[in-house]
Image (cartoon, rainbow, N blue to C red):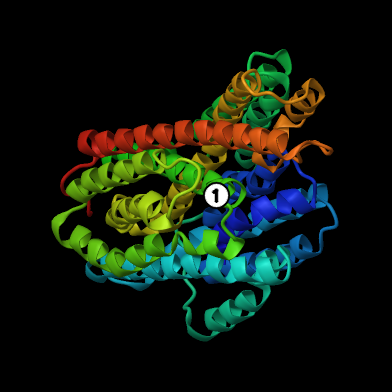
Amino acid sequence: MVFIDGTVVNVALPVLQAELNATLADAQWVVESYALFLAALMLVGGSLGDHFGRRRIFAVGVALFAGASAWCGTSPNVHQLIVARAVQGLGGALLTPGSLAIISASFTREKRGQAIGTWSGFSAILAGSGPIVGGWLIDHASWRWAFWINVPLALITLTIVYWRVPESRDDSATGSLDWFGALLATAGLGCIVYGLIESSNSGVSAAHPLGLIALGVAALAGFIVTEARSRAPMMPLPLFRSRTFTGANVLTLLLYSALSGALFFLPFNLIQIQDYTTTAAGASLLPFILIMFLLSRLSGGLAARYGAKLLLIVGPLVAAFGFGLFALPDVGGSYWTTFFPAVLALGFGMAVSVAPLTTTVMGSVEQNHAGLASGINNAVARTAGLLSLAVLGVLLFQTFSVSLDRRLETIDVPSQAKLEVQHHRAALAAMALPDNLSRESRSALKKAVAESFIAGFRLVMLVAAGLAVASALTAWILIEPQHMR
């Protein structure tokens, strides 16, 4: 459910943006409100599972996720949709860490690598089928079905949970939950993200966004202090004494920042600039998904047998090459010669990386901390997406604006039309062009908008490539050759 939701919503965003008359900031918040609560409360979800039973908390999360999905599917405007997505994020924070913790508690150390690889593979297949099925539903029905699809999946999941999944918990978990730490984490991340997104409207150097970002940094600093002093912290800092655990989480932060930003902006390019249908945009990532499915189990087994260090160096470097290839296409051209090579390279890179990374995280802590380790790593991955989407959104918008202004100066269209385009720049490529223009003027404006978006998109992909290279360096420096305890 979580993997399908993440990929389907990205494909639905360009259509949703047009139908609900939303700005880029609104579209970002549809993703960010979900990611904020998912990232900030993931650690609480892991702790709740360790305290009260992983199967029980997982089931509660599935039910809440499904109910919020139904709310998303009936939302009459973008603001209510954003609130419903926040509730959906709360459900995701309960069910996501329980998934890997249940696997870790149910398999022996020798079989855990292949089990996690199988989990990664099937997650990838379902994530890949989501955009294709969702894209078809969006093209032939409505974007609302991108959320309604979760309801029958939840019923199937709950049936399997109570039929086949054993209960497990951490018998050593005592004391109260760290709600104050969760509040500080949520406030800190929320202020930083809000400040970054607001800077698109007010300017990067404006006092209001900078004040929010400073407040968020202060709250996160308070979170670290709280965790260091708490008797029952949701993120025990002693876990980070493990060099491998620390390195794996830094690698996760960097690599998933790159991946999240790239996958968020790619559908906008494909649908609004390249004129793909929603179905075609969803299907464009199918090679990525198939590679993930076919290789994840193999890479998980290799990591368990030979160690993950080499795989966690090679995989991100191949992914960086894929991100770089995404920066090459211009407007137009065949999918097979433009985006397919990039999707292929990114798929190989991530397939080599994901299962060994997960196995490394789970193997670098004691078994009774499996829920916490899973929660921390998932929280880091979600935080990576949360922050990168805000930062890369600012970079894309600023690049788009500068490029658009430069191009508008060189084209021969009425001054009033140029002013209207500049006024609606917050919608990026989804902006409605002025009425009553000649065919030549409309074509010139459309080309200027498209080329300006491509300029911002290229910068995003090059930054993503740099982040992937940095993650490979992190593995080289911090991941120990023998990572399994």
Give the residue displayed 57% in from the left and 77% down from the top: 157
- Placement of the N terminus among the 4 image quadrants: bottom right
Give the residue displayed 76% in from the left and 41% down from the top: 432
Instruction: Say if residue 117 shows up in the picture.
Output: yes
Say left or right for 448 vs 337: right
Q: Nearer the viewer, residue 119 or 98?
A: 119
* Residue wearing tag 1: 274
Q: Nearer the viewer, residue 10 or 106?
A: 10
Vertical order, 3 against 324 (above or below): below
Q: Quadrant of residue 439?
A: top right
Q: Nearer the viewer, residue 445 or 149?
A: 445
Kind of residue indicated by mark 1: Gln
Give the secondary structure at mark 1: loop
Say left or right for 247 vs 314: right
Residue 398, given in percent of the width and then of the height, sits at 60, 24
Residue 380, given in percent of the width and then of the height, sits at 47, 43
10 Å crowding of disc 1: few (<14), some (14-19), many (20+): some
Say left or right for 122 vs 67: left
Residue 453, given in percent of the width and then of the height, sits at 57, 35
Residue 444, given in percent of the width and then of the height, sits at 65, 33
Vertical order, 418 against 77 (above or below): above
- Placement of the C terminus among the 4 image quadrants: bottom left
